[in-house]
Image (tube, rainbow, N blue to C red):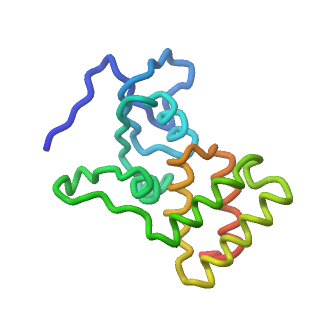
């Protein structure tokens, strides 16, 4: 399978200047971090978004599972969805993102949900963070949730 994006469309990377006059439409996000992925999703709203994951940046596995994204290295395989217990937890966490898990109530609720996942042995940092990013959580909320996960499960 070959894919390409003509030059009149947006290609965004973490190092690209933010002052460019990007237009909405199809977007290629190359090795995005949380901020770049958030911008790419906003620009691609109502169109298509392709993201190329980097091993050293923001994990996209949960993002891909949440959106049912096609893995271009395995185009004939059906996209994986989230495991039911993770999907339910992401739904509950999404309700707490109003203040980016920075307020006492949101932080407490997130910690309770994360402890439940940890107790069930399904606390998957990358999947949870990526899935919340796919649901439109801000980069700030994802960063704060990552800190909460790291406090529970430092690796």
Residue 48, position as x, y percentages in the image? 35, 34
Observer-nearest of 149 and 109: 109
Residue 42, position as x, y percentages in the image? 51, 31
On screen, residue 74 versus residue 48, left or right, reads: left
Quarter of the view holding residue 105: bottom right
Q: Residue furthest left?
A: 1
On screen, residue 107 versus residue 79, left or right, reads: right
- Image height of 30 relative to 131, above or below: above
On screen, residue 1 versus residue 137, left or right, reads: left
Question: Which quadrant is home to the N terminus?
Answer: top left
Quarter of the view holding residue 103: bottom right
In the image, what residue occupies the spot 68% across and 70% down?
Answer: 113
In the image, what residue occupies the spot 64% across and 75% down?
Answer: 154
Question: Which quadrant is home to the C terminus?
Answer: bottom right
In the image, what residue occupies the spot 38% across and 43% down?
Answer: 51
- Image height of 10 relative to 121, above or below: above
Residue 151, position as x, y percentages in the image? 72, 72
- Image height of 40 relative to 75, above or below: above
In the image, what residue occupies the spot 67% across and 59% down?
Answer: 145
Residue 124, position as x, y percentages in the image? 52, 71
On screen, residue 7 versus residue 127, left or right, reads: left
- Image height of 11 relative to 85, above or below: above
Observer-nearest of 86 and 50: 86
């Amino acid at each position: 399978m070959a894919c390409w994006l003509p030059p009149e469309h947006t290609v965004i990377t973490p190092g690209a200047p933010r002052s460019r006059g990007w237009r909405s439409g199809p977007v290629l996000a190359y090795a995005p971090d949380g901020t770049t992925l958030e911008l790419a999703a906003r620009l691609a709203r109502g169109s298509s978004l392709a993201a190329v994951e980097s091993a050293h940046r923001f994990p996209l596995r949960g993002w891909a599972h949440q959106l049912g994204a096609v893995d271009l290295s395995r185009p004939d395989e059906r996209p994986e969805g989230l495991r039911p217990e993770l999907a339910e937890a992401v739904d509950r966490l999404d309700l707490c993102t109003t203040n980016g898990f920075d307020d006492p109530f949101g932080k407490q609720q997130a910690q309770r949900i994360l402890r439940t996942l940890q107790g069930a042995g399904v606390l998957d940092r990358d999947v949870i963070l990526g899935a919340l990013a796919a649901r439109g959580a801000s980069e700030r909320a994802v960063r704060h949730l990552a800190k909460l996960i790291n406090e529970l499960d430092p690796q």
